[in-house]
Image (cartoon, helix red, strand yellow):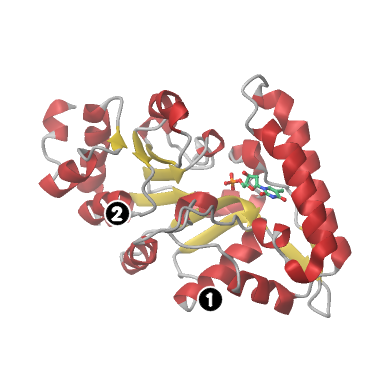
Amino acid sequence: AAARAATVPAAVRAALQQEHVKMKNPERALAKIAKMIEGGADELLVISDFDHTMSRAYDEKGERCWTTHGVFDNAQEMADLAKKCKDLSAHYLPIEFDGNMTIEEKIPHMEAWWRQSHDAIVEKGVQREVLEKLVLNSNIRLRDAADSLMAHLDAARVPLVMFSAGIGDIISIFLAQRLGAVPSNMHIISNMMTYDDKKVVSGFREPLIHTFNKNGKVISKEEVNFFHEMRKRDNVILMGDSMGDLHMDVGVENHSEADTLKIAFLNQKIHLLDFYTANYDVVIVDDQSMTVPRTIMDAIT
Ligand code: TMP
């Protein structure tokens, strides 16, 4: 591993040696990157979370940025729906982060949260056009350099899987508005809406994806086929911001999770640092940019 790690370019080393970039085992992380550089763009697959990973957790003023579901919590034109979503968040968010509960104990609560929130959206009868307006006026923001990272991966024909427990339609509307179009290399695995013939949201497709089932269990047959097409790409980079993002690579065929380069963004919850570095190869602390991943991916492609 040491010999292999030595082949990593200086720019990548410098990026990883920054004060706010934490690694428990730098040599192992560098060895994974070195193997990916050898494999190049043709063997690379990137899997990323969206909310507060591809998008910012905080804006320049230190205000919390919205998640994809957050557009409903903040929908002033639909005060009843906004109140319902806010009340649900107030009840369930403490459960999501409860240090005294196991994931198994949390799962039924997360399902209940997502289902009630989705039912409320469907009941409200939200039109696609209204959704687009909500997203346009939202405080969902891309991380700095995220647009150039996505453009770079697209140009290098590296598939980018956006694996999100948020709402897939909000992600694609947001990217179309901010980038002009959803990049052609992108594959979104998320909660997708269905519409009636008047373009009113009529439901959400199954399986439901929540924070703690973002793994092989929720991927549909379509997704299995997608990962089958990707089977030659066994250099996998995973990016997330929560412990629930750790196993987003489970759907990758013939792939050992131990080979994945796992990069986390730790936003403010600094007390979790040891926990994050024990599980992620690279932990980027309070940095609202994609600069570090971009430097690594530049070296590979
Ligand atoms: P993710 O970052 O793993 O994709 O998780 C999505 C986040 O969305 C999770 O922290 C809970 C949050 N959420 C809301 O803010 N409002 C909602 O209505 C729901 C269902 C989830």
Q: SS at mark 1? A: helix
Query: Residue 79 at what x, y percent from top left?
Result: 81, 64
Dot 2 alpha-carbon crowd within 10 angstroms: few under 14, some 14 to 19, many 20 or more: some
Q: Is residue 176 above or below residue 223?
A: below
Q: Quadrant of residue 135?
A: bottom right
Q: Quadrant of residue 32?
A: top left
Q: Quadrant of the C terminus?
A: bottom left
Q: Is residue 52 above or below residue 107?
A: below
The amino acid beneath tag 1 is Gln
Query: Residue 83 at what x, y percent from top left?
Result: 80, 55
27 vs 23, left or right, is left
Q: Is residue 202 visible?
A: no
Q: Is mark 1 within 8 Å of ligand 1?
A: no
- Outermost residue, top direction? 100
Name the residue rendered at 66%, 34% in the picture. 96
How much space separates mark 1 and mark 2, taking CA atoms? 22 Å
The amino acid beneath tag 2 is Thr
Dot 1 alpha-carbon crowd within 10 angstroms: few under 14, some 14 to 19, many 20 or more: some
Name the residue rendered at 46%, 27% in the picture. 271
- Which mark is drawn over residue 291? 2
Q: Is residue 131 visible?
A: yes
Foreground of the two, 153 or 35: 153
Foreground of the two, 19 or 32: 19
Q: Are marks 1 and 2 in contact (CB under 8 Å)?
A: no
Earlier in the chain: of badge 1 and badge 2, it is 1
Q: SS at mark 2? A: helix
Q: Quadrant of the N terminus?
A: top left
Name the residue rendered at 45%, 62% in the picture. 142
Q: Which residue is mark 1?
A: 177
Query: Residue 277 at what x, y percent from top left?
Result: 38, 28
Query: Residue 287 at what x, y percent from top left?
Result: 36, 48
